[in-house]
Amino acid sequence: MRETVQLHVGSIEEMGKRFTGAWHRLERGKALKETHLTFFSLEAMMSTLSPKRLELLKRVHQHPANTVAELAKTLGRDYKRVHEDVSALSHAGLIVRDENGIMAPYDSVQAIVSLDA
């Protein structure tokens, strides 16, 4: 099954509405399998998903890495920059880094920008 993460640019209120809506759907017995991440500004989302970080995210999704050093070598990039990128993507919830290595669990990323915020 393909798993998509939905990225939102919006407010805490919008994030709360998504949570409440999901809660009500669960109460009605509807199964939910969705993941949402919220950025509070377009600038924050764009800096987190820079072209280099998107390249890294795609690479890690296709070929999980054991270490940042291995990933930096594979990408032909500086270790320090790759470490910063892995940390930022991990902090955002787009990369999982644990004792099994570095991996990207989502098959696709869908960005949604609210014009009401």
Image (cartoon, rainbow, N blue to C red):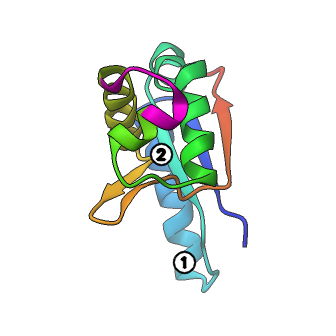
Quarter of the image with the N terminus is bottom right
Specify the label residue 94 is tagged with: 2
Residue 72 at x, y percent in the picture: 42, 32
Q: Is residue 74 magenta?
A: yes
Magenta span covers which residues? 73-79
Dot 1 alpha-carbon crowd within 10 angstroms: few under 14, some 14 to 19, many 20 or more: few
**Residue type for callout 1:** Leu
Residue 80 at x, y percent in the picture: 29, 22
Which residue occupies 43% across, 25% down?
Answer: 40
46, 34: nearer the viewer: 46
Mark 2 secondary-structure assignment:
loop
Furthest residue toward bottom: 29
Whether residue 29 is situated above or below residue 101 in the rendered picture: below
The quarter of the displayed image where residue 28 is located: bottom right
Residue 34 at x, y percent in the picture: 59, 62
**Residue type for callout 2:** Leu
Q: Is residue 68 magenta?
A: no
The quarter of the displayed image where residue 70 is located: top left
Residue picked out by circle 1: 26
Furthest residue toward right: 1
Q: Real-space Cα distance between discs 1 and 2?
A: 24 Å
